[in-house]
Every structure is written in structure tokens, then in C-alpha cells.
Image (cartoon, grey):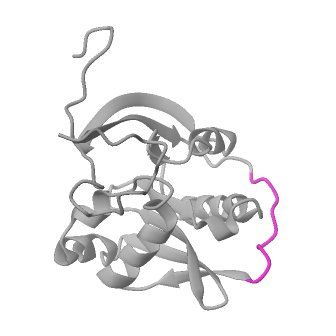
Amino acid sequence: MLSDGFHDIPPGKVAAVVTHLEMRSRAEYRDCPVPTGCRLIKVDRPGADWYTQLFRIVGASDWLWFSRLRMSDAALEDIIQDPKVHVYSLRRGDRDLGLLELDFRETGACELAYFGLAGALIGQGAGRFLMNEAMRLAWAQPIQRFHVHTCTLDSPQALGFYIRSGFTPVRQQIEIAPDPRLDGLIERDAAPQVPIINP
């Protein structure tokens, strides 16, 4: 258990405050039309290449989404091709610009494992539309708990958005991990709001 006060983060690492949230019954939808030119597509048995490309578009340039990028293709596909993991793309024309991943592997629960939009869709109601769809799809299954976590390496709007959507914060943790920009996993100029501390 951490004591109160400041704690050093080793050089070469990044730290995030992780907030876990849940809803125990379906929240009210906030009306939002389908964004112009967009459609939600369920992607059956997504390949690692397709998935990591969308994962990077949504979360690796402006933010520091990196967990799935550290996985081998085989390990990633074991997750995203599991029949109890449902992967969706919010597609405009022929471009995949939004990621929705619902994980039903825990009995009676659904994890909103990944949820994000490329910058081209921000501010157009796409986030609200995608959350409405996430809630509809999750609660269509026999679940008692819908949960998600976000962190300070994600968009600063994410936590408030989840709370407004009906999730309740229930737990916080500190996560420390190698900075993915130092080993070339993500471009060095990604997420400039998070300083790089060289080892």
C-alpha cells in the first residue's frame, strides 16, 4: 500500500491513475443520430494487423494507448477472435475511425474493453452514438454488470464522458509501465502532453 505523499516514477517509465467504473443496470440513452456518413460494423474474427492499425489511429498518437501493441499477433488474436469478444468499427466510407470492443468472457458481466474515436470524428456526436450502441449491445445480453476503466494517459474528456453516460467510479489504481515511445512501439512525438523522462 502506498503511503501519502509524492512517489518517484523511474526514468523511462510512464505512470497513470486508472479509474474503474461500472453500471449495474442500463442507463438512460441520450438521443443522438448516426453521424453523417457513418455506420457501425461488427468485425468477425478481426486480424491483428487490422486491429492494431485501428488501435493506433484511435489511441496511440494523441494518447498513449499501448497495451495491445505490446502483445504478439497470436496473443492478440486469441482475445479479439474469441466468440465472447465482440469487436465493432465505426466506419465512414471505407475508413475505420472508431473502435468498440465488448468483452463478455466473464459470466454475467461485460467489459467495455476499448472505446475510442479518431480525431476526424471528434465533436460530431460520434462518441454519444457509439456509447448508445455499446449500452444497447451490452445490455441485450444477460449481464448484471457493465464496466470500463480509463486512465490519465487517455483523453481528459473520457472520465467525465463515462460518468455522464451512467457509469459510477468504484476504484482507482496507479499503473506504471515502460514508456512505449522509448522503445519505438509508438512514435516519439506522440502524446506530447506526457513528458518523456529518459533513463
The answer to whether residue 174 shows anywhere in this view is: yes
**Residue at position x 35%, y 58% in the image:** 188
Q: Horizontally, is 28 left or right of 80 in the view?
A: right
Q: Is residue 140 magenta?
A: no
Q: Residue at x 28, y 70 (%)?
A: 79
Residue farthest top in this picture: 4
- Where 65 sits versus 13, above or below? below
Instruction: Write the residue at 39% across / 62% down.
Output: 104
The answer to which image quadrant residue 74 occupies is: bottom left
Q: Position of residue 7 (x, y in %)?
A: 27, 18
User: Which range is magenta?
Assistant: 29-37
Q: Is residue 146 left or right of residue 32?
A: left
Q: Quadrant of the N terminus?
A: top left
On-image quarter of the C terminus: top left
Residue 32 part of the magenta-drawn span: yes
- Residue 119: where, in percent of width, then height? 62, 65
The outermost residue toward the bottom is 94
Determine whether, in the image, residue 25 is placed left or right of residue 5.
right
- 4 above or below 103? above
Q: Is residue 156 above or below residue 120?
A: above
